[in-house]
Image (spheres, grey):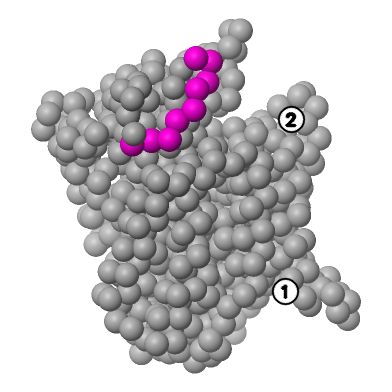
Amino acid sequence: MNIAIAMLISITILIIGFFTWGRYVAKKSGVNPEIPTPAVRINDGVDYVPTKPIVLLGHHYASIAAAGPIVGPTLALIYGFVPAWLWLLLGVIFIGAVHDFSALFVSVRENGRSIAHIARKTLGNTGFAFFLSFAILLIMLVNAAFLQLTAIALTSYYPISKLGLSPDQTLLKTTVINGEIYGKIGGIASTSVIVITAFAPLIGYLLYKKHIKTFIASVLALSIALVSVIIGFEFPVTLEPKFWMVAILIYSFVASWIPVWIILQPRDFVNVHLLYLGLIGMFLGIIGSGFAGVKIQAPSFNINSESMEALGLVWPFLFVTIACGAVSGAHSLIATGTTSKQLSNEKYAHLIGYGAMLLESFLGLCVVFVILGAVDFEHYKELVWPMQNGHIKQGNAPLAFAVSVGKTLNNGLGIPISYGTIFGILMLEGFLITTIDTLFRLMRYFFEELWNVLFVKKPRILESRIFNSILGISLTALLAFTNGYQKIWPIFGSANQLLAALTLVAVTAWFAQKSIKAYFAAIPAGFMILTTITSLSILLKRYIESKNLTLTITDLLLLFLAFGVVFLTFKYFFKLRTELSKEKIPEMVK
């Protein structure tokens, strides 16, 4: 199929989903623009800050759209084009976007509280503690995988000959590896990260203290983003991957406890301009490539021993591998952790909750078409699932994406492959770091809430934002430095989508309290619980056989917490049904 036709069909389906199912879910939920949001009522200038819709959409989208919709579809394409394409479309419209909107809306109605706190109202303190623990484990898995992917992206090299550059070129700084000249494409992104982070407090000051117009802030933010790339070409920073992991952990420690407007929001605001440019660029490149006659270069289905060795059975592993591109429990942590505290009016919940998730699916679809239009299936496997001694070893999914972006922009828009490849790395880096810092801040929130449940009189140190930030970062580092991202990805995807299922369970229970029949949340919850518990059970067997103690313990904890929440949920609904029956009996007698 021509990639332009496939892209246009996909966009049409997403738009129809937004204006039909999305509006239906918002209407059934009871959105009311007249009810003041927590951001308006509390407005403490630290966490509760009424934010302009366009700014909040950028912050929320940059926070949720991390490596998931890029790396997930890239890995899952080993199953072929059709399975990935269908799940990215149907999964997001009926499950993923419903999940994100419902979590945001319910949190807004509950004073901006986290999804775990919302579960407390229906599942009690035990369910609350289970939810918090599950969320903390998930964030550890997400950030452990993303830390490694960031380090890989920021230290990537690629042969300059494959970028269409001659040995005497001066565009890229180079190094020689095994006699071949490689360009330091990751070093440019590294410099960009440093420059954007350094200027973030200035943007935050102008936006939230001087209240400059959003348009002016956007022009300034875009200028900073572009200048950071120009500086990167001249002064690419090349560091060891582990050093980058440590540096990002230190940055995340600072960003996780200082006021949100100083670094977190403005850095996302600056960075999201690169992400929007990337989305637009990929879309135009795909359409242009389609006009040039480029077609999808992959089998419709590739469900065989090869894909089995790479990931496992197509069900459940296709679903948990694509993860964030279709459904993501981590989004509920962001929606109920930071976004709900910044929503200025309920009428924007549909746009930011449901709409941003469709944008994430759009990103995932762009990734699919970019890769399958730029490289043939054999080249794709060489980059992502390379063979060594007859077995698949860890590949470089970030590089596969960046190279594909370069070739797509070249095919469709005539942009040199070298520039397009660098832009691909910049996009991936931007999505990664904007999620890592947000999630570490959320982990700090969850530890603070967990101590309130576990201790009647908690030690003073547990009230410290600095201590809770260090605790979360230390546990994540332990996991990140002992396992590769392709080992972590399946259990991350399983835990991520299981949290989505548990979130849908919690919001269904909340709606039940309000006498709203939320079938739009209950049915997806059942499907996702079955899918993810199956995947975790299969993974547990793998980890035990490979004697991976860290991931075995993590898997067991996730299963234990999940079964605990499911049990408490059934217990709650049985109790609720009994109470409703008792209420009806006197009415009938009367």
Q: Is residue 16 visible?
A: yes
- Residue matched to label 1: 465
Q: Give the residue displayed 38% in from the left and 44% down from the top.
A: 233
Q: Is 147 part of what is drawn in magenta?
A: no
Residue 456 visible in the current orientation: no
Magenta stretch containing residue 173, yes or no? yes
Which one is in front in this view, the residue at disc 1 or the one at disc 2?
A: 1
Task: Using the image as rendered, state which of residue 184 and residue 254 is in the foreground.
Answer: 184
At label 2, the amino acid type is Tyr
Question: Crowding at label 1, few (<14), some or many (≥20) Cα neighbours within 10 Å?
Answer: some
The percent coordinates of residue 569 (x first, y second) are: 65, 61
Please tell me whether mark 2 sits on a helix, a strand or a loop.
helix
Residue drawn at x 50%, y 65% as measured from the top left: 198
- For the residue labelled by badge 1, is the local secondary structure a helix, a strand or a loop? helix
- Point out the stretch of residues depicted in magenta: 171-179
**Which one is nearer the viewer's eye here, 563 or 35?**
35
| Location of residue 76 in the rendering, given as x and y in whole percent from the top left corner | 46, 31
In space, the residues marked 1 and 2 are separated at their CA atoms by 34 Å
Image-based side of 235 in relation to 22, left or right: right
Q: Is residue 28 left or right of residue 566?
A: left
Image quadrant holding the C terminus, namely bottom right
Residue 496 image label: none
Name which quarter of the figure residue 464 lies in: bottom right
- Residue at left offset 78%, top offset 77%: 463
Can you say whether 371 is above or below 573 in the image? above
User: What residue sits 67% from the left and 58% below the top?
Assistant: 250
Please report whichever mark, 1 or 2, sits nearer to the chain's N-terminal start. Answer: 1
Q: Which mark is residue 543?
A: 2
